[in-house]
Image: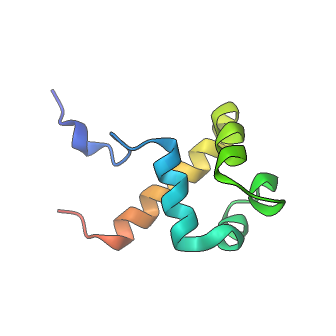
Amino acid sequence: MTAPNNNPLHGVTLEQVLTALVAHYEWEGLAERIDIRCFKNDPSIKSSLTFLRKTPWAREKVEGLYVKLMRTKRPLE
């Protein structure tokens, strides 16, 4: 049986992921990295969450950017 902490997204909600990305990159930086209209036009956590929950490819990109950010913030143990 594998430990759940092998998955960097284990126990992290989509809202926490998005909030962390917005805190780090701000909306403009996030929109530059992931070309999604809900990050460019009147962005909000609520509207972005609605879109990301319905759009698997966009959610994968957001989660991938979050994992990359977390790996650069703290070294792997």
Residue 56, located in which quarter of the rendered image? top right
Residue occupying the point 65% across, 66% down: 30
Residue found at x 71% / y 72%: 28
Against 28, is 6 above or below? Answer: above
Q: Is residue 65 visible?
A: no
Quadrant where the image shows the C terminus:
bottom left
Position of 74 relative to 54 (above/below): below
From this viewpoint, is residue 6 visible?
yes
In the displayed structure, 39 sits above or below 75; it is above
Q: Nearer the viewer, residue 24 or 72?
A: 24
- Labels in figure, total: 0
Q: Is residue 63 rendered to the left or right of residue 55? A: left
9 lies left or right of 22: left
In this picture, residue 35 sits left or right of residue 72: right
Quadrant, the N terminus: top left
Expressed as whole percent of the image width and height from the top left, the position of residue 44 reads: 70, 54
Q: Is residue 4 above or below residue 31?
A: above
Dividing the picture into quadrants, the one containing residue 6 is top left
Q: Residue 43 at x, y = what percent?
A: 75, 58
Residue 41 lies in quadrant: bottom right
Q: Residue furthest top?
A: 1
Left or right: 44, with 17 as reference point? right
- What is the x, y in percent for residue 73? 35, 72
What colouring method underlies this structural image? rainbow
What residue is drawn where x is 69% and y is 47%? 48
